[in-house]
């Protein structure tokens, strides 16, 4: 079996196409970069990384397997995540359709300094698709003769590096565009598009068997 470092490198390459596919974190980073700048986008990225860590920890403890193999438990997680994504997406679409600048997102939770982090975390941890990565893809990079938890930690680290590097790069591009274009008009368009993406992801999550 390959060393943990080689296995992590292989896992990082395997999840790269998944990370490049626009999803919840992509839409949130775009919206926060345009609305509040790179610091807010960084909070979303941190929340996303923590969400990935949660999925890795649950997989290591066997809890994700219970959720994915129990129809009732999976349905609860799926519907909660779908409702969150659809609700956030509809707010973004509504904000994009307004003529006046949008007010601060009501989806920010009460924690004053953790709003962006919490949004990024919830957007990732409530998505059953993210859990499926650690239940279907990760086992291919594990050595069954070695403890699972340390190996999953290495895989999570690779996933976190790939995901955060892509989101930081994209956030930088969006921030640069923010300074050179009609911010309000561009933001409305991107926010609306991001809202559509989130609604679509929520609906897809709700109907996935």
Image (cartoon, rainbow, N blue to C red):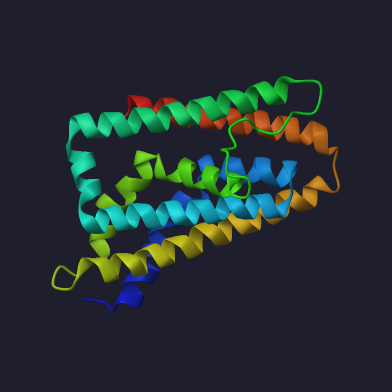
Q: In the image, what residue occupies the spot 57% across and 62% down? A: 165
Q: Quadrant of residue 127?
A: top left
Q: Quadrant of residue 69?
A: top left
**Figure check: 86 above or below 180:** above
Given residues 33 and 209, the one toward you in this image is 33
Q: Position of residue 40 (x, y in %)?
A: 67, 50
In which quadrant of the rendered image does the C terminus lie? Answer: top left
Q: Position of residue 27 (x, y in %)?
A: 59, 40
| Residue 22 in view here | no
**Figure check: 149 above or below 54:** below
**Figure check: 38 above or below 9:** above
Task: Please identify the residue farthest to the bottom as the structure is shown.
Answer: 3
**Figure check: 110 above or below 103:** below
In which quadrant of the rendered image does the N terminus lie? Answer: bottom left
Left or right, 79 with respect to 17, comes to left
Left or right, 145 with respect to 195, comes to left
| Residue 151 in view here | yes
Q: In the image, what residue occupies the spot 36% across and 26% down? A: 206
Left or right, 29 with respect to 128, comes to right
Q: In the image, what residue occupies the spot 33% across and 32% down? A: 78
How many numbered discs sit on the rendered protein? 0
Q: Position of residue 185 (x, y in %)?
A: 80, 31
Q: In the image, what residue occupies the spot 43% across and 51% down? A: 51
Q: Position of residue 131 (x, y in %)?
A: 33, 47
Q: Quadrant of residue 38?
A: bottom right
Task: Please identify the residue farthest to the left as the structure is shown.
Answer: 145
Left or right, 149 with respect to 110, comes to left
């Amino acid at each position: 079996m390959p060393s943990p470092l080689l296995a992590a490198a292989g896992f990082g390459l395997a999840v790269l196409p998944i990370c490049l596919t626009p999803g919840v974190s992509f839409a949130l980073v775009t919206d926060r970069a345009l609305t509040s700048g790179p610091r807010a986008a960084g909070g979303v990225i941190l929340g996303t990384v923590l969400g990935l860590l949660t999925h890795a920890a649950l997989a290591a403890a066997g809890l994700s397997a219970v959720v994915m193999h129990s129809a009732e438990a999976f349905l609860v997680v799926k519907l909660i995540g779908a409702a969150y994504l659809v609700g956030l997406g509809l707010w973004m679409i509504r904000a994009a359709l307004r003529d006046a600048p949008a007010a601060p997102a009501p989806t920010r939770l009460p924690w004053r300094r953790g709003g962006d982090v919490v949004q990024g975390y919830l957007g990732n941890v409530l998505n059953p698709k993210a859990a499926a990565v650690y239940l279907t893809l990760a086992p291919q990079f594990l050595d069954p003769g070695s403890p699972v938890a340390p190996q999953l930690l290495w895989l999570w680290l690779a996933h976190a590096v790939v995901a955060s590097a892509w989101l930081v790069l994209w956030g930088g591009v969006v921030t640069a565009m923010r300074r050179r274009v009609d911010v309000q008009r561009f933001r409305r368009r991107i926010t609306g598009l991001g809202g559509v993406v989130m609604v679509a992801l929520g609906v897809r999550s709700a109907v996935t068997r």
